[in-house]
Amino acid sequence: MKSYNIAVLPGDGTGPEVVQEGVKVLNAAAQKYGFKLNMTNYDFGGDRYLKTGEVLPASATEEMKKFDSIFLGAIGHPDVKPGILEKGILLRLRFELDQYINLRPVKLFPGVECPLKNKGPEHIDYVVVRENSGDAYTGTGGVTMKGTLHEVAVQSAVYSRFQVDRCLKYAFEYTQKRNKKNTLALCGKTNVLTFLYDLWERAFHEMGDKQYPTIKREYYHVDATCMWMVKNPEWFDVIVTGNMFGDIITDLGAITQGGMGIAAGGNINPEGVSMFEPIGGSAPKYTGMNIINPLAAICAGGMMLSTLGEQKAADAIEAAVMDITANKLKSLAAGKMGYSTTQVGDLVAERV
């Protein structure tokens, strides 16, 4: 029997509650589809930091490399200053494990309320491939004369051709494998960020011409992308973009698919260890109340299985979630689902 070693990072706030339901569903899928998941829990997060002063042990990255994948709950603690845990755990793991792709499916499930007028599941089903290792997120820059009238702050958006090419390669191959509209759209800002997105655009067309002639290519400025994501989301198949634009448009996408309670994402190293998580954060005010929506974590587990190659199990999880949203849940909001967190996990696991 095939087995996979999974590092589980439940994290902070409601993270452990949603992870518990994700693990429940993952185990149901593994049992049905004939593979095994060996889970190892790690206590990285706010409570550990407050007790020990250590955000992430020095050995953590090397230890994570031994696993086939990482399943994450949420990072963020009300008693820890914003940025400490996010940079010290999430960004550090992403950079040190070279998870250079952030993958965000934007899919409206049946029965889920969409804030866009007259849009249903048939209109919202696309994927954003966000480059995850460069741009303004590398910390390149600095401040001079801080605290004075003449303070200057510089934060540079930096990309190498290598970073751009490997992201584009992943996006083209993902579009090919997805095999829906076979259209890849580059989201940039070539009219203002003339150096940065000229590099992206040239690389995009060179790679498309030489290696992926069957994939249709489109280009959208980021502001136009935001507009069409609201007005005509049905136009999109796969969008590829840089780190900062990707960060912004994926959250816009998430709200069009019903909000953070259903949005899942993957931080992917196609040649190494990837990490999957619900997008919604730790929601500390709901901790321990058993009312938080676990579907985003369950969907993140499905993405993890898909990336590991267990596509039938991943499809079964998505189908089960769609059945629950269509036929069971009154709402995706915490405390308004009509079921507790654990009951929602049970419903999905039973259907799997």
Image: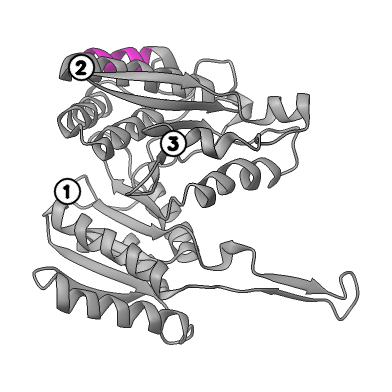
Which kind of residue does numbered mark 3 sit on?
A: Pro
Residue highlighted by disc 1 = 122
Q: Where the N terminus falls, by quadrant?
A: top left
- Disc 2 crowd, CA 10 A, few/some/many (<14, 14-19, 20+): some
The label number, if any, that marks residue 176 in the structure image: none
Residue highlighted by disc 2 = 351
Question: What separation in Å lies between label 2 and label 1 (alpha carbons)?
Answer: 23 Å
Q: Residue 302 appears at what percent x and percent y?
A: 29, 32
Please indicate, yes or no, whether residue 23 appears anywhere in the rendered image. yes
Residue name at image x 52 percent, y 68 percent: 135
Residue name at image x 39 percent, y 59 percent: 130
Q: Residue 206 appears at what percent x and percent y?
A: 23, 80
Q: In the picture, residue 281 is in which quadrant?
A: top right
Q: Earlier in the sequence, mark 2 or mark 1?
A: 1
Q: Where the C terminus falls, by quadrant?
A: top left
Question: What span is in magenta?
Answer: 343-352
- Above or below for 351 versus 226: above
Question: What separation in Å lies between label 1 and label 3 (alpha carbons)?
Answer: 23 Å
Residue 349 falls inside the magenta stretch: yes
Residue highlighted by disc 3 = 278
Q: Earlier in the sequence, mark 3 or mark 2?
A: 3
Q: Residue 238 appears at what percent x and percent y?
A: 25, 60
Which kind of residue does numbered mark 2 sit on?
A: Arg
Residue 31 falls inside the magenta stretch: no
Q: In the picture, residue 156 is in which quadrant?
A: bottom right
| Figure colour scheme | one colour
The reply, left or right, for residue 277 in relation to residue 173 is right
Residue name at image x 41 percent, y 67 percent: 163
Please indicate, yes or no, whether residue 340 appears anywhere in the rendered image. no
